[in-house]
């Protein structure tokens, strides 16, 4: 089953992904090897043991073994009778020991093999015996040394390679061996080039990220869709320890590998939420990744990492005193790691959203009813080690948090929706639940999306099939529009087209994807058609952010369905003139509001009514946009 689908924007992925990346434990181990700290670690390990004289050992630890007279043992068990010389031969208790025994065993095995061959093919053996008696009467032409010398071959001076007597046979043999080596090197280079060409991501390739599970195996697949030839294949996949529920793309994380930016790296990363309380962040540009780049929350694995490190260290070779043995000290106890990390979610992670303004900030919603904000570049030290802890925890929901979405341009405004049938707007800089704005739903929230072309509009889909849109400047009142998108099965996911204003996609477990025109809802969006994608009940849908006409979806059928709507005449007739490249891109009518208010300044002021004032400050030069919109709307 496919739980989540996300397109990777063009240009984000590394065209030539690497095959392997050192894990954190491996990196720390290599750093200790280079710093020469392994000896100190070994000494610390040896400090946990103390030397104990055998005479001082307790009676409970001493076991008396009764003496045995060797003469009373059978001849086969008298070890003193064995020869110390391995090359010699001896008989002990009727057993032949030495080379003769090995020869007899080899002869017996060879005879058994000959018997099997004779029994399996008697006719061939008889023919071979007959041919063996026939003398070889073939005549061989003698070697013409003078002729070889005349051709510069077979000289005996040893000069070779241009000598007066030509090339020697040794020279020819060396030349043949060198040619074979050159051919092998050329073949290896060709194979390496073929491997690089196979994994290389081309300009026409569109990448689709798929979180899926088949029976007991969960994985994250990076699929490549060749837009030129319409081919779809799996580029590489990453095994996951638990069933995935959600994912979010990001570009900035803190790495354990030191660099000029204090370990902060920019790349192609994905955060994955699952039934486990931890959030795993994987590097998508590593093909054979064995463990995530970061883990936010979850189980404390410090003990296993230290155990792995201890296993890699060389064993101490220091000799013990005579008559002494090692005994574990009872008074020293190590703090063994275990349980959840400090600040972690305590239940499944159901929703994730990576901030597009503050690119190191990730928001997570869980079945424990909390929303946590994580700074993926900042780790703090604590009694359970050095790792990333949440920057803030929001508790304004009373049930599972199903959906999250950061505002596309206001970096501290977060929309959340949960199973308490509420959708909320929260100020990420304040943990006070009193500043959270709330709107009620008639059913559990399933998906949240901001309109990228009219960013004051927040759209919410619920499990009863209803999709509603609010103007967040007047949040909490009646929605701007409301419609029933899917009568049977509810809405499982939705997505706005980033290139085409007003194009909204919804999917449902009724196996269909529906398109809607939300540009001028009067009183609700206009349906533009639907399609059965033939991949089972749909759980996720996504528009390609680098092309206006590609969308992908997936669900219970465990297969991806890609719909290129460029070939749909009815859709092109309605939306083709609205693409981002068009000078007359339509925008919805927006009422004239008061002058601008700086959102960031209001948040920094620490006002209790920060959210309200910030929402009012989202009216930025709407008068000019409204006039342009009216001119476009009058066009027929």
Image (cartoon, helix red, strand yellow):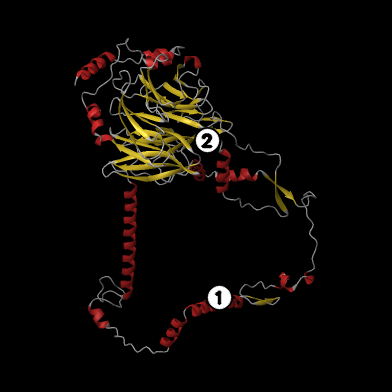
Report which quarter residue 285 is drawn in. Answer: top left
Please name whichever residue, 46 or 471, is drawn nearer the observer in this view of the structure: 471
Name the residue: 29% across, 72% down.
160
Name the residue: 37% across, 26% down.
485
Residue 432 is situated, as x and y percent measured from the top left of the image, at 50, 16
Report which quarter residue 466 is drawn in. Answer: top left
Q: CA distance from mark 2 to mark 1?
A: 57 Å
Q: Which residue is mark 2?
A: 276
Marker disc for residue 109? 1
Indicate the secondary structure of the residue bearing disc 2. Answer: loop
- For label 1, count other residues whose C-alpha is less than 10 Å away and answer few (under 14), some (14-19) or many (20+): few
Is 145 positioned to the left or the right of 348 in the image? left
Mark 2 or mark 1: whose residue is earlier in sequence: 1
Please name whichever residue, 629 or 154, is drawn nearer the observer in this view of the structure: 629
Indicate the secondary structure of the residue bearing disc 1. Answer: helix
Residue 373 visible in the snapshot: no
Residue 554 is situated, as x and y percent measured from the top left of the image, at 39, 38
Residue 112 visible in the snapshot: yes
Q: How many marks?
A: 2
Is 366 positioned to the left or the right of 97 in the image? left
């Amino acid at each position: 089953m496919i739980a989540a689908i996300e397109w990777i924007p063009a240009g984000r992925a590394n065209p030539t992904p690497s095959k392997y990346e050192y894990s954190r434990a491996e990196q720390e181990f290599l750093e200790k090897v280079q710093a020469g700290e392994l000896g100190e670690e070994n000494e610390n390990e040896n400090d946990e043991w103390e030397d104990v004289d055998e005479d001082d050992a307790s009676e409970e630890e001493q076991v008396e073994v009764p003496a045995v007279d060797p003469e009373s043992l059978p001849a086969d068990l008298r070890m003193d009778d064995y020869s110390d010389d391995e090359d010699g031969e001896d008989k002990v208790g009727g057993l032949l020991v030495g080379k003769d025994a090995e020869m007899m065993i080899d002869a017996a095995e060879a005879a058994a093999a000959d018997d099997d061959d004779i029994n399996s093919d008697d006719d061939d053996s008889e023919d071979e015996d007959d041919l063996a008696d026939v003398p070889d009467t073939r005549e061989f032409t003698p070697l013409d040394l003078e002729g070889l010398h005349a051709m510069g071959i077979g000289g005996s001076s040893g000069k070779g390679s241009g000598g007066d007597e030509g090339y020697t046979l040794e020279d020819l043999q060396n030349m043949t061996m060198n040619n074979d080596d050159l051919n092998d090197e050329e073949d290896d280079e060709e194979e390496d080039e073929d491997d690089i060409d196979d994994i290389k991501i081309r300009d026409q390739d569109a990448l689709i990220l798929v979180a899926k599970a088949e029976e007991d195996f969960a994985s994250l697949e990076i699929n490549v869709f060749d837009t030129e030839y319409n081919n779809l294949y799996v580029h590489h996949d990453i095994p996951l320890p638990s069933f995935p529920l959600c994912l979010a793309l990001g570009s900035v994380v803190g790495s354990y590998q030191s660099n000029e930016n204090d370990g902060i790296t920019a790349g192609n990363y994905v955060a994955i939420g699952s039934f486990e309380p931890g959030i795993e962040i994987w590097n998508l540009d590593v093909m054979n990744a064995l463990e995530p780049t970061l883990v936010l929350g979850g189980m404390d694995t410090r003990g296993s990492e230290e155990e792995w490190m201890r296993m890699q260290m060389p064993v101490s070779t220091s000799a013990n005193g005579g008559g002494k043995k090692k005994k574990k000290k009872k008074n020293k106890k190590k703090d063994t790691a275990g349980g959840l990390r400090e600040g972690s979610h305590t239940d499944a992670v159901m929703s994730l959203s990576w901030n597009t303004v503050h690119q190191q900030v990730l928001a997570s919603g869980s079945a424990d009813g909390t929303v946590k904000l994580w700074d993926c570049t900042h780790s703090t030290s604590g009694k359970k080690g050095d790792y990333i802890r949440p920057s803030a925890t929001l508790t304004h929901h009373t049930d599972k948090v199903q959906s999250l979405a950061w505002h596309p341009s206001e970096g501290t405004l977060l929309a959340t929706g949960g199973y308490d049938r509420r959708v909320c707007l929260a100020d990420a800089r304040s943990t006070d639940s009193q500043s959270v704005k709330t709107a009620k739903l008639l059913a559990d929230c399933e998906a949240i999306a901001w309109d990228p072309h009219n960013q004051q509009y927040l759209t919410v889909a619920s499990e009863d099939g209803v999709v509603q849109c609010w103007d967040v400047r007047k949040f909490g009142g009646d929605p701007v529009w409301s419609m029933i998108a899917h009568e049977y099965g509810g809405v499982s996911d939705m997505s706005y087209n980033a290139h085409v204003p007003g194009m909204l996609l919804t999917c449902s477990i009724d196996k269909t994807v529906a398109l809607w025109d939300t540009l001028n809802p009067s009183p609700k969006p206009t349906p533009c058609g639907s399609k059965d994608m033939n991949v089972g009940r749909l759980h996720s849908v996504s528009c390609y952010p680098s092309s206006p006409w590609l969308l992908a979806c997936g669900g219970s059928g465990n297969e991806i369905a890609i719909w290129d709507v460029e070939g749909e005449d009815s859709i092109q007739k309605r939306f083709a003139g609205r693409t981002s490249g068009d000078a007359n891109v339509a925008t919805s009518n927006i009422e004239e509001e008061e002058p601008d208010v700086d959102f960031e300044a209001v948040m920094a002021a620490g006002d209790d009514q920060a959210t309200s004032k910030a929402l009012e400050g989202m009216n930025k030069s709407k008068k000019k946009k409204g006039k342009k919109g009216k001119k476009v709307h009058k066009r027929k």
